[in-house]
Amino acid sequence: MNGTSAAAEDRVFAALANATRREVLRLLRDGGPQPVQALADHFAMRRPSLSEHLKVLRDAGLVSEQRSGRQRIYRLEAAPLAEVQDWLHPYERFWRDRMKGLGDLLDSMPDDDRP
């Protein structure tokens, strides 16, 4: 992996590390593109604070911004999430194999149904 893609991946993981930003992504996933104010209505924070979270998400490529008159409409950009999934896949496979091994071990043990 080259330095540029590693830096981009780091920005995505850093963006996802924050619960507010994950919630913004969920809102955009479930509700489609939304203006800043509609997103802000879901949080007990000042709009400039939410704007900082949106900037982090934009810089990570997780959302895009489109101006419509005086409004800024945000849209989920899911492509970077596919890269996260690709990164996580070997770990998922690791744990699935471990759980299968544990299941096989438990299946091979005698039952304790003795009186």
Image (tube, grey):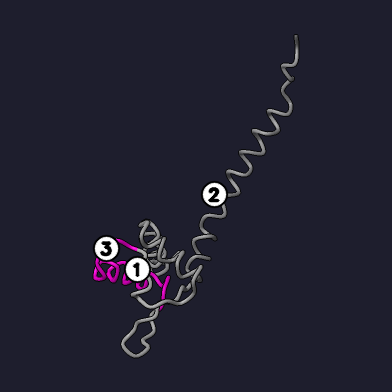
Residue segment shown in magenta: 43-64
- Identify the residue at horizontal 72%, vertical 23% (top origin): 109
Q: Which mark is residue 41?
A: 1
Q: Which residue is mark 2?
A: 91
Distance (Cα) linking label 1 and label 3 = 9 Å
The image shows residue 96 at horizontal and vertical percentages of: 62, 44
Judge from the rendering whether residue 63 lies leftward or rightward of residue 89; answer left or right: left
Q: Residue furthest front?
A: 41
Callout 3 amino acid: Met
Quadrant holding the C terminus: top right
In the image, residue 59 lies at what x, y percent?
35, 72
Q: CA distance from mark 2 to mark 1?
A: 36 Å
First in sequence: mark 2 vs mark 1? 1
In this figure, which residue is indicated by the disc labeled 3? 45
Give the residue at x 26% y 70%: 47
Question: Element under label 2?
Answer: helix
Look at the numbered disc 1 and give the secondary structure of its residue.
loop
63 inside magenta stretch: yes
Compare residues 35 and 52 and report the one nearer the observer: 35
